[in-house]
Amino acid sequence: MDDLQTLGVELVTLSKDQLKKIDLPENLGMAVREAQRITKHEAHRRQLQYIGKLMRSIDADPIRAALDDIKGVSAAANVRMHALEGLRTRFLADETVIGEIAATHPDADLQLLRQLRRNALKEQQLAKPPRAFRELFKVLRELQSTAGSTEEPTQSND
């Protein structure tokens, strides 16, 4: 019971965007949003207890898995992140990898990807902060998430 209430507290601490990624029953989602809105200590505590009560009537495992994914704890999230990092590294080393990205994500903005690659390489040469390097990872991650697939970017053994 305490574990479910702790899980409810974790839900309340999430941002609106993170909450959207979790498939919550309507009544639980409303209770979580209400708890985020409440500022008075005692009312907040009672709302958290109510969330714990609601959590007892549902299967909490999918919610735990989604929270782990958001926090980057899950093994699947780690695999996806490492695959994206590998794809970014290969793309920086070889521009022809853009063909692989285009095949996997036909809606990708290839011009933006090429520009970010050029900027990232220039940043590395001039020992500047890795702004474009990070932006390239962000764009690749967004491409993967908008594809809505569980496909992992392919890695070659070259």
Image (cartoon, rainbow, N blue to C red):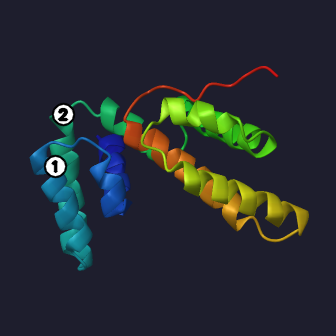
Mark 1 neighbour density, 10 Å: few (under 14) some (14–19) many (20 or more): some
Q: Report whether 15 appears left or right of 39.
A: right
Please name the residue that numbered disc 2 is placed on. Answer: 58
Q: Position of residue 42 (x, y in %)?
A: 22, 73
Q: Residue at x 11, y 47 (%)?
A: 26
Q: Residue at x 18, y 52 (%)?
A: 29
Q: Position of residue 123 (x, y in %)?
A: 81, 66
Answer above or below: position of 157 versus 65: above
Question: Any mark on residue 28, and which?
Answer: 1
The answer to whether the residues at label 2 and label 1 have Cβ atoms under 8 Å apart is yes
User: Residue type at mark 1?
Assistant: Leu
Answer above or below: position of 87 versus 15: above
Q: Could you give the CA–CA distance between mark 2 and mark 1, rounded to whole angstroms? A: 10 Å
Question: Any mark on residue 103, and which?
Answer: none
Where does the C terminus fall, quadrant-wise?
Answer: top right
**The quadrant where residue 33 appears:** bottom left
Q: Position of residue 31 (x, y in %)?
A: 15, 57
